[in-house]
Amino acid sequence: MKNKRICAKGHTYFKTSDCPVCPVCEQGRKPANGFLEQLSAPARRALESKGITTVQQLAEFSKKEILALHGMGPASVPKLTSALQTAGLDFKK
């Protein structure tokens, strides 16, 4: 059952989970370019929570470390790998 919610900015939305994130606010936070633009909101928040906002910072982590982050799923790995390869980088071994 979906629960009606109102965020701090006044947006009304419905959620079936306990997730407190407002989808309207989250869409406004989505980057317009860069590798974070290609990721889902949970995956993007997972990286941002660790301070990872550039591919150079991403390259400091192993694939296993990234997948262990809450919100990061296996579907994001090909996108991250591609972004790293484009920059001539790779996950930490």
Image: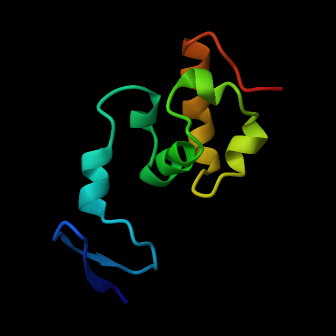
Instruction: Tell me if residue 1 comes above or below residue 51 in the rendering.
Output: below
- Across and down, in percent, residue 44 comes to 48, 45
- Indicate the position of residue 32 as horizontal and vertical percent values: 29, 32
* Residue located at (28% from left, 51% from top): 27
Q: Is residue 43 above or below residue 12?
A: above
Q: Residue furthest bottom?
A: 1
Residue 84: image quadrant is top right
Task: State the image quarter where residue 2 is shown.
Answer: bottom left
Nearer-the-camera pick, 8 or 15: 8
**Which residue is more in the foreground, 9 or 33?**
9
* Colour treatment of the image: rainbow
- Determine the residue positioned at 18% across, 69% down: 11
Q: Residue at x 51, y 43 (%)?
A: 48
- Name the outermost residue toward the left: 10
Looking at the image, residue 6 lies above or below residue 44: below
Work out which quarter of the rendered image holds the C terminus and state it.
top right
Q: Tell whether 47 sits left or right of 29.
A: right
In the image, taking residue 32 as reference, residue 58 lies left or right, namely right
How many numbered tags mark residues here?
Answer: 0
| Location of residue 1 in the rendering, given as x and y in whole percent from the top left corner | 37, 90
> Along the horizontal axis of the image, is 90 left or right of 71?
right
The furthest residue to the top: 88
| Residue 70 picture location, percent across and down | 62, 58
Q: Residue at x 39, y 35 (%)?
A: 37
Furthest toward the right, the residue is 93
Q: Is residue 53 above or below residue 5?
A: above
